[in-house]
Image (cartoon, rainbow, N blue to C red):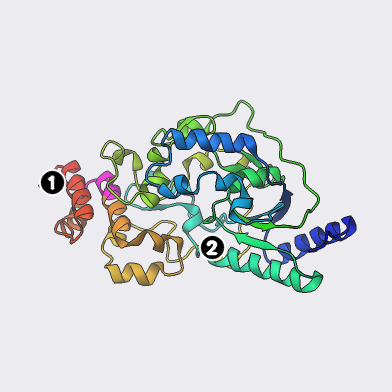
């Protein structure tokens, strides 16, 4: 394509932001593609084995910090933010404190954000291409090999906190990120400055000690990794620390003082579905595989499958207050067809002193 004039690029940026907001995106920024310090951080993180069984992190290598390897010709990254905090949900601290209830990470209470954000970004880019003429682009939402938080920081959307999540002064950290990789040499935004200061509340708040140092997360100990990405057994020494967290973990965000500025999600897809903000563990553990498939269709939870879901629930029941309902729920699946589930049920029963 021919190089567009500077005025045209500024106009494109203004159009993109206007249309993005109309589609429900809360903030837009533009970043360049060079992030050498973040690349070195990634190299050290992989060398330390902190990615655990997530082999795709190793396979993609430096593609995450070199977007031209992923999409040749990329000159800029348009980064967008969409709030997901479900304001109507039962307070997270209350659910975590009640051991008979199941805690689901707040981002997973509604519909699958990939199904909303990726098509919206694609419609946005395609609509602009029809209006101003051809340009190259690639839409990414979470699953693409892109260091999204680093590029969001460079685009001015927020800074990376000591817990490794992105934080915005005006919105906290309860939001999703998405990107459009493009060959348009758009004017750059100023990178966001950091404002954690001396605060390190997130580090001791981690139930499993996964934040081993500021900006250093050992995924192998992270509850989100253990309950979602990890396909095998949860290490027995970490099981008691999971408490009633059955899908993900929000503790490091719950203690972050910047989240007093969290903005409630405006999109209806992020409203709580199926009472997942405070369900009873025994009720969820009584589901059949078909009930799981039907109920979780359209949710990010569907991706982990019934086996991992059951494994996580068995651990939470092992940590729950002992009672007839808990023991009965575990005993009912002591002969589960899955060896993985059986092993975690046996652990839970032993933890309650049951045969």
Side (left or right) of 338 relative to 179 = left
Compute the Cα span from label 2 to label 1: 42 Å
x, y (%) of residue 265? 61, 58
In percent of the image, x 61 and y 25: which residue is there? 198
Q: Is residue 213 left or right of residue 261?
A: left
* Circle 1 Cα neighbour tier, 10 Å, few/some/many (<14 / 14–19 / ≥20): few
Label disc, if present, on residue 354 of the rendered structure: 1
Q: Earlier in the sequence, mark 2 or mark 1?
A: 2
> Observer-nearest residue: 248 or 120?
120
* Left or right: 323 in relation to 127: left
Q: Is residue 173 visible?
A: no
Residue 114 disc label = 2
Magenta highlight on residue 319: yes
Q: Nearer the viewer, residue 306 or 36?
A: 36
Q: Position of residue 49 (x, y in %)?
A: 41, 36
Q: Is residue 295 magenta?
A: no
- What secondary structure predominates along the stretch shown in magenta? helix
- Describe residue 85's horizontal placement relative to residue 104 as left or right: right
Residue at 45%, 48% in the rendered image: 59
Residue 76, image x, y percentages: 72, 52
Q: Quadrant of residue 24?
A: bottom right
Foreground mark, 2 or 1, reads 2
Residue 30 in sight here: yes
- As drawn, the residue found furthest toward the left would be 355
Q: Secondary structure under badge 1?
A: loop
223 to 17, vertically: above or below: above
State the SS at label 2.
Answer: helix
Start-end of magenta stretch: 315-322
């Amino acid at each position: 394509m021919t190089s567009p004039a500077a005025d045209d690029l500024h106009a494109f940026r203004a159009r993109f932001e206007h249309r993005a907001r109309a589609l429900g995106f809360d903030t837009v920024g533009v970043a360049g593609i060079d992030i050498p310090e973040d690349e070195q951080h990634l190299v050290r993180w992989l060398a330390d084995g902190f990615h655990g069984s997530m082999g795709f992190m190793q396979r993609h290598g430096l593609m995450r910090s070199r977007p031209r390897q992923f999409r040749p010709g990329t000159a800029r990254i348009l980064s967008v933010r969409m709030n997901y905090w479900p304001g109507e949900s039962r307070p997270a601290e209350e659910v975590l404190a009640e051991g008979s209830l199941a805690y689901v990470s707040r981002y997973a209470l509604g519909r699958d954000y990939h199904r909303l954000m990726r098509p919206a970004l694609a419609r946005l880019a395609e609509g602009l291409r029809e209006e101003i003429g051809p340009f190259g682009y690639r839409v990414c939402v979470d699953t693409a090999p892109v260091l999204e938080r680093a590029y969001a920081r460079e685009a001015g959307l927020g800074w990376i906190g000591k817990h490794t999540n992105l934080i915005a002064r005006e919105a906290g950290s309860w939001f999703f990120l998405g990107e459009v990789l493009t060959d348009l040499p758009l004017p750059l935004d100023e990178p966001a400055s950091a404002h954690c200061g001396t605060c390190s509340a997130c580090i001791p708040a981690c139930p499993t000690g996964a934040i081993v140092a500021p900006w250093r997360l050992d995924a192998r100990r992270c509850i989100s990794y253990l309950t979602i990405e990890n396909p095998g057994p949860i290490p027995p020494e970490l099981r008691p620390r999971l408490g009633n967290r059955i899908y993900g973990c929000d503790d490091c965000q719950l203690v972050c003082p910047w989240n007093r500025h969290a903005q409630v999600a405006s999109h209806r897809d992020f409203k709580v579905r199926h009472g997942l903000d405070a369900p009873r563990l025994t009720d969820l553990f009584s589901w059949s595989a078909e009930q799981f498939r039907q109920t979780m269709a359209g949710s990010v939870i569907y991706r982990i499958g019934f086996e991992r879901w059951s494994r996580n629930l068995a651990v939470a029941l092992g940590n729950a207050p002992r009672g007839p309902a808990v023991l009965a729920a575990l005993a009912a699946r002591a002969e589960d067809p899955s060896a993985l589930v059986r092993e975690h049920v046996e652990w839970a029963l032993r933890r309650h002193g049951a045969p």
